[in-house]
Image (cartoon, grey):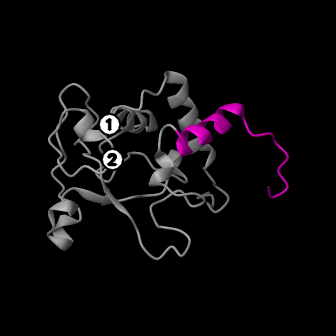
């Protein structure tokens, strides 16, 4: 693409396949834009209830206080619902999640791997993310992060020098 002839790293390819398959990331982060605005007309945005915690903590997780889109709609299904953000350029935008509670992409992937807040044992009755564990291997997680990092495009950035 754009005259680039470099071969795509096998880890990135595996990461894409995991992102779209076993890890189920593509069910919310829709390609080719990789965020929650629904194709093909991109007129509506999805929101999901993930059970996001205040910070990444798998031992003593605490549900984030933000009630999300419930503030707008006052329907229980929207309690803790958040807009799905893009994973493009995610390597440049830490910290992660809507509250900035996760420091690394590895933490984000592990949160999803464990089934979100409900998978961590929190009471999130309207969680839309499946609470079942994904059972991703260490290599799977590494490959997904490689794919996400491959979505980084700095061509639109300008130097501050």
Q: Which residue is mark 1?
A: 115
Q: How many marks?
A: 2
Secondary structure category for the residue under label 1: loop
Distance of label 1 from label 2 (alpha carbons): 7 Å
Front one among 17 and 148? 17
Could you tell me which residue is drawn at 39 percent across and 39 percent down?
Answer: 108
Q: Is residue 151 above or below residue 157?
A: above
Q: Which residue is mark 2?
A: 129
Asked if the magenta segment contains residue 27, the reply would be: no
Residue 24 placement, left or right of 62: right
Could you tell me which residue is drawn at 38 percent across and 46 percent down?
Answer: 96
Secondary structure category for the residue under label 2: loop
Which quarter of the figure has residue 58? top left
Residue 121 placement, left or right of 115: left
Q: Which mark is residue 34?
A: none
Location of the C terminus by quadrant is bottom right
Q: Is residue 157 above or below residue 105?
A: below
Residue 65 placement, left or right of 139: left
Mark 1–mark 2 CB contact (< 8 Å): yes
Q: Position of residue 154 (x, y in %)?
A: 63, 55
Q: Is residue 2 above or below residue 138?
A: below
Q: Position of residue 40 (x, y in %)?
A: 56, 71
User: What segment carries the magenta color?
Assistant: 1-21
Give the class, few, some or many, for how many residues have Cα within 10 Å of label 2's Cα (few <14, many ≥20).
Answer: some
Could you tell me which residue is drawn at 85 percent across and 55 percent down?
Answer: 3
């Amino acid at each position: 693409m754009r005259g680039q002839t470099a071969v795509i790293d096998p880890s990135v390819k595996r990461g894409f396949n995991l992102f779209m398959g076993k890890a189920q990331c593509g069910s919310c982060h829709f390609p080719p834009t990789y965020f929650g605005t629904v194709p093909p007309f991109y007129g509506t945005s999805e929101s999901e209830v993930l059970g996001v915690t205040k910070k990444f903590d798998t031992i003593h997780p605490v549900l984030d206080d933000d009630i999300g889109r419930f503030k707008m709609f006052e329907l229980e299904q929207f309690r803790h619902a958040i807009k799905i953000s893009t994973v493009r350029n995610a390597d440049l935008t830490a910290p992660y999640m809507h509250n900035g509670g996760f420091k690394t992409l590895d933490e984000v992937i592990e949160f999803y791997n464990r089934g979100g807040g409900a998978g961590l044992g929190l009471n999130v009755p309207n969680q839309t993310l499946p609470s079942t564990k994904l059972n991703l291997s260490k290599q799977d997680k590494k490959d997904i992060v490689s794919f996400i990092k491959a979505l980084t495009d700095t061509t639109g950035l300008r130097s501050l020098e």
